[in-house]
Image (cartoon, helix red, strand yellow):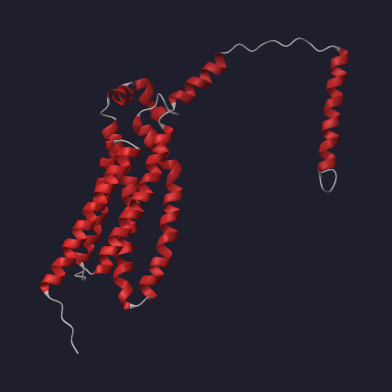
């Protein structure tokens, strides 16, 4: 027997996919705005739209059929991408009060370096079972696995190279961060002047002169040093190191 699917059913699937994606994006905007700021929400939505466009575009280029499994996979990609993006944005939010004199670009770079290893490792581990599902699974699972492969790969890219830089661009328009960015003392070398200033200040501090030890104090100090050496020798599993 031959089963046929009418055009109205295909149109219904496409409309359901569009509605589901729009509702998901709306919920994401509300959550990010409530949890962070609206500028973080804008960057997140741009990254999510990038992931959806990449997944749908590759499907169109390869002339693959869009099924209900594809819609479910795209929604799964949105959930994974928002999770990966929130990890980076949450670290940015944590570093804002810790780096009070740094520009927002510096805060974003530091936050990315602190989370990039985790993001890449999580993405790689997630793609392993999905790749196995695509190459060794049944025909009904290939569409689902293929959409996940494309979407999760683009999601890892968008979280690092789209969401975080876009947040930095939007935040640096604020007067405070614009002042930090335009201040040569703060912008030089990406904020490393803070460390250099602290080092120079420590070098300029006068070194206090210590009073000479009396013979009795010197004897007590030498005895304490010998006692510490005896304790270290006892702690070694094989006695004195050779």
How many marks overall?
0
Q: Is residue 2 found left or right of 139 in the rendered image?
A: left
Tell me: residue 226, above or below residue 26. above
Quadrant the C terminus occupies = top right
Give the image quarter of residue 59: bottom left
Q: Is residue 81 found left or right of 210 in the rendered image?
A: left
Identified at 85% across, 41% down, the residue is: 234
Quadrant the N terminus occupies = bottom left
- Pick whichever, 161 or 85, lies toward us: 85
**x and y percentages locating residue 143 in the rendered image:** 29, 70
- Residue furthest to the bottom in view is 1
Q: Is residue 215 found left or right of 79 in the rendered image?
A: right
**x and y percentages locating residue 217 in the rendered image:** 85, 15
- Pick whichever, 156 or 228, lies toward us: 156
Give the image quarter of residue 5: bottom left
**x and y percentages locating residue 71 in the rendered image:** 25, 64
- Pick whichever, 239 or 70, lies toward us: 70
Identified at 41% across, 70% down, the residue is: 132
Give the image quarter of residue 89: top left
Identified at 38% across, 71% down, the residue is: 133
Tell me: residue 28, above or below residue 106. below
**x and y percentages locating residue 200 in the rendered image:** 51, 18
Identified at 31% across, 75% down, the residue is: 140
């Amino acid at each position: 027997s031959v089963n046929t699917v009418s055009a109205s059913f295909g149109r219904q699937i496409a409309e359901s996919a569009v509605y589901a994606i729009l509702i998901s994006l709306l919920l994401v905007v509300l959550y990010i705005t409530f949890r962070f700021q609206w500028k973080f929400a804008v960057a997140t939505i741009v990254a999510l739209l990038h992931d959806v466009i990449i997944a749908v575009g590759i499907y169109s280029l390869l002339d693959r059929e869009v099924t209900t499994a594809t819609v479910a996979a795209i929604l799964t990609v949105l959930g994974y991408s928002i999770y990966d993006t929130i990890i980076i944005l949450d670290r940015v939010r944590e570093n804002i009060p810790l780096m009070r004199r740094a520009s927002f670009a510096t805060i974003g770079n530091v936050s990315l370096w602190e989370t990039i290893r985790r993001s890449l490792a999580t993405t790689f581990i997630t793609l392993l079972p999905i790749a196995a599902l695509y190459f060794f699974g049944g025909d009904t699972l290939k569409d689902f696995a293929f959409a996940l492969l494309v979407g999760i790969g683009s999601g890892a890219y968008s979280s690092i190279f789209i969401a975080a830089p876009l947040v930095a661009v939007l935040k640096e328009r604020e007067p405070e961060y614009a002042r930090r960015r335009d201040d040569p003392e703060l912008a030089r070398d990406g904020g490393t002047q803070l460390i250099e200033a602290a080092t120079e200040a420590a070098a300029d501090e006068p070194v206090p002169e210590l009073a000479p030890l009396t013979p009795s104090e010197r004897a007590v100090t030498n005895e304490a040093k010998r006692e510490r050496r005896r304790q270290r020798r006892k702690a070694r599993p094989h006695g004195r190191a050779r």
